[in-house]
Amino acid sequence: MSEHNGAMMQFFHWYTAGDGTLWRNVSEQAEALVAAGITALWLPPAYKGADGGSDVGYAVYDLFDLGEFDQKGSVRTKYGTRDEYLTAIKDAQAAGLQVYADIVFSHKLGGDKQEEFEATPYDPENREKAIGKQQRIKAWTHFNFPGRARTYSELHWHWWHFNAADYNALDDKTEAIYLFKGKTFGGNVDLEKGNFDFLMGCNLDINDPDVRTELFYWGEWLVDTTGVDGFRFDAVKHVSSGFFVDWLKHVRAYTGRNLFAVGEYWSGNVEALQNFLDATDGNLMLFDVALHFNFAKASKLGAEYDIRLIFEKTLVQQNPQLAVTLVSNHDSQPLQSLESVVEAWFKPLAYALILLRRDGYPCIFAADYYGAHYTDIGSDGKPHEIWMERHQWMIDTFLSVRQTFAFGEQYDYFDDPGCIGWTRLGTDEHPGGLAVVLSTSSAASAKSAVSAASDVSRGGASGAAAKGNPENWTKQMQTGAAGTRYIDVTEHIRNPVTTDAAGWATFPCLAGSVSVWVPG
């Protein structure tokens, strides 16, 4: 994380084009992203997945195949080849970006051969309840990576390297999670479903000596090979929390670098997030999923949502030093199994809340920045076409303000259920500070207000709005600069505001919108 107002970007989404061009896009976009104010990129899983060249990367097949070997029907991954990946990292770092690798330690899929062994079926909804006796099962648990042929690693994976699977070729009718003979579900995991160690596929036995040795060695190999600056850990609530501490300490000691780390613990329960952070003793950060859920709720309720509560029961409120704040990600986008949509009208407000405040390390989502268009099957079994709006201009505007004005003390004015604001007072090196006002309303009213401001991403306020539309909100707030002229960089409000001798002024914004005021 950058020491001075850093911001990362998730440079992909679930439906990123599978044409093998993403790594080249990193190289092409790196300098522009740095110029915009991005300081780090979170890149998708770079290793071969079970679906080869079309796999998003979370159905892990071979950690050592970064798009180099002909496996699962493809040499390249969805995002490109190994050489393109390594070049993308070098180009990003040369431009001034840190690069974070996406890592999955919970499971493997796409085994090369089936094996037979003993296991006990458990209820998928209650992993503490056996639903049958120990029995012979047959599962895809042998991974011998024929395309790689022991390059980089000698280990072939067998059933004893896992503790559970959800498939039995000898009984394809029973829905069960099969706990392997001599194994137990892992401890120090989320307690949903009794024990949430198992997520999918072949579940890694993280306590097996061969598994631990291999993953520790792979961490060394990964950093030696790629030179990445940190890691994003997937599905951490499904893996013993202590393993991440052990792995990070090992890799950090091996490299002599304080490599960055953030985990994805998909839960809106801030107590569960805090318990994980306590268990890992500050060795990694977590995404503030609770804040994301607040954004989604506020965007749907509009004026019915009390915007004063937007940070209630969130990680950034309770543990700001270890919170990575986000608006959306690949799991939350429309048509995903964890779909949790922040409506388009609210996204500028949400990005202001993560980019222009003091606390948290903000993460920008590529589909919010560049927009996205895709078709997938919905929960109703029918195809749906999705358009996600592009918010690049507004996010770039906020990033510029973040770099120039978002410094110093923060004064909050969370005193109205429909409108909140805050100021940053600035510092000697970054004088003038800023003032932010945002308001909520019904989605229809919000869209109308944005429409009145001309263009979703950059138009100025209409004459009626600028002259005092009754839907305008105002907030009297104190800045760090007396007698200073402030302008709204969102261009929603055209008339400037000037502070009095004590630095106070009344700052307006449109209903269902946000205005960001800086000296100008």
Image (cartoon, rainbow, N blue to C red):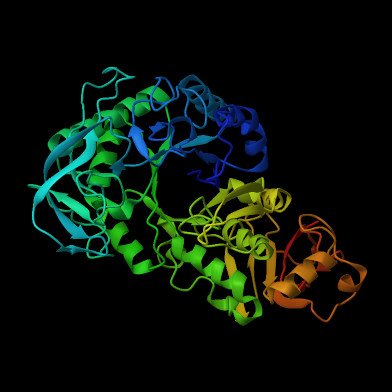
Name the residue at 61% across, 55% down.
384
Residue 409 visible? yes
Name the residue at 57% across, 77% down.
308
Residue 430, given in percent of the width and then of the height, sits at 66, 51
Residue 382, given in percent of the width and then of the height, sits at 56, 57
Query: Foreground: 181 or 469?
Result: 181
Depicted 103 relative to depicted 272: above or below: above
Residue 101, given in percent of the width and then of the height, sits at 43, 37
- In this rendering, position of residue 181 left or right of residue 432: left
Query: Foreground: 470 or 254?
Result: 470
Q: How many labels, in total?
A: 0
- Image quarter hosting the C terminus: bottom right
Query: Foreground: 180 or 46?
Result: 180
Q: Quarter-wise, where is residue 366 in the image? A: top right
- In this rendering, position of residue 275 left or right of residue 291: left
Depicted 344 relative to depicted 108: above or below: below
| The furthest residue to the right | 463
- In this rendering, position of residue 310 left or right of residue 482: left
Name the residue at 69% across, 53% down.
389
Depicted 98 relative to depicted 264: above or below: above
Residue 419, given in percent of the width and then of the height, sits at 66, 77
Name the residue at 52% across, 31% down.
79
